[in-house]
């Protein structure tokens, strides 16, 4: 004897719900992909506008700088600035030669400054210089003072003050000197 099983669909709406869910998911994915594509397209348009605006601004600034250079007496040629007259060149040469000793002094100070000696202030009034700073070793200001005394640029090099900072291992120093002119 054969047995037959009867299948009854007690929930007939399940197939319909599953079909609607698949359609809704598919529609949602299409909407999300379309939104991403539209967002990327709009962002690209925004970036292109910014680049164009920047290029226009840059070209305007170049034109303004070119006009200012012409007004100030500079002419562009062969990617170099050329002076209109020789007097400008002579004036600049006078400035450079007038301050040659100061430039040499700064260069010498930078080259000879010991590693744990730090300058905090350089005051210059005519030929008188006042070099102030901080040292971690109490011997270093005196050593550097002797180096400065040996250089032909400086004369009357003397240590004005050397005092210890409160609650610190650091020393404050002040060196006064005159520059040969």
Image: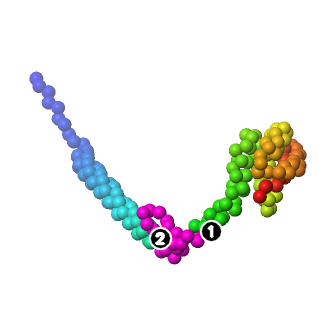
How packed mark 2 is, by other alpha carbons closer than 10 Å (few <14, some 14-19, many 20 or more), is some
At x 65%, y 65%, the residue is 94
Compare residues 86 and 76 and report the one nearer the observer: 86
At x 84%, y 49%, the residue is 157
Q: Quadrant of the N terminus?
A: top left
Residue 134 highlighted magenta (yes or no)? no
Q: Secondary structure at mark 1?
A: helix
Mark number, residue 73? none
At x 77%, y 58%, the residue is 181
Q: For this view, does 131 lie left or right of residue 160?
A: left
The residue carrying mark 2 is: 75
At x 39%, y 61%, the residue is 47
Residue 148 lies, in percent from the top left, at 79, 46
Residue 70 highlighted magenta (yes or no)? yes
Residue 97 higher or lower than 134, as above or below: below
Q: How many marks?
A: 2
Residue 83 lies, in percent from the top left, at 52, 69
Q: For this view, does 178 lie left or right of residue 24?
A: right
Compare residues 73 and 165 and report the one nearer the observer: 73
How packed mark 1 is, by other alpha carbons closer than 10 Å (few <14, some 14-19, many 20 or more), is few
Q: For this view, does 47 lie left or right of residue 1?
A: right
Q: Nearer the viewer, mark 2 or mark 1?
A: 1
Q: Earlier in the sequence, mark 2 or mark 1?
A: 2
The residue carrying mark 1 is: 91
Compare residues 180 and 115 and report the one nearer the observer: 180
Res. 174 in view: no
Rounded to the nearest angstrom, the CA distance separating label 2 from label 1 is 18 Å
Q: Tell me where the magenta segment starts and ends, as one range.
A: 67-88
Q: Which scheme is used to colour this image of the protein?
A: rainbow
């Amino acid at each position: 004897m054969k047995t037959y099983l009867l299948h009854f669909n007690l929930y007939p709406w399940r197939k319909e719900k599953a079909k609607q869910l698949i359609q809704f998911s598919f529609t949602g994915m299409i909407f999300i992909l379309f939104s991403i594509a539209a967002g990327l397209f709009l962002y690209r348009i925004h970036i292109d506008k910014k680049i164009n605006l920047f290029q226009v601004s840059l070209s305007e600034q170049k034109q303004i700088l070119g006009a200012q250079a012409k007004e100030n007496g500079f002419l562009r040629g062969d990617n170099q600035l050329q002076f209109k007259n020789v007097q400008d060149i002579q004036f600049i040469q006078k400035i450079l030669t007038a301050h040659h000793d100061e430039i040499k002094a700064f260069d010498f100070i930078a080259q000879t400054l010991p590693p744990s000696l730090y300058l905090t202030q350089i005051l210059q009034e005519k030929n008188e210089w006042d070099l102030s700073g901080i040292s971690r070793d109490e011997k270093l200001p005196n050593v550097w003072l002797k180096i400065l005394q040996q250089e032909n640029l400086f004369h009357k090099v003397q240590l004005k003050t050397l005092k210890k900072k409160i609650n610190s291992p650091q020393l404050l120093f002040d060196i006064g000197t005159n520059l040969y002119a």
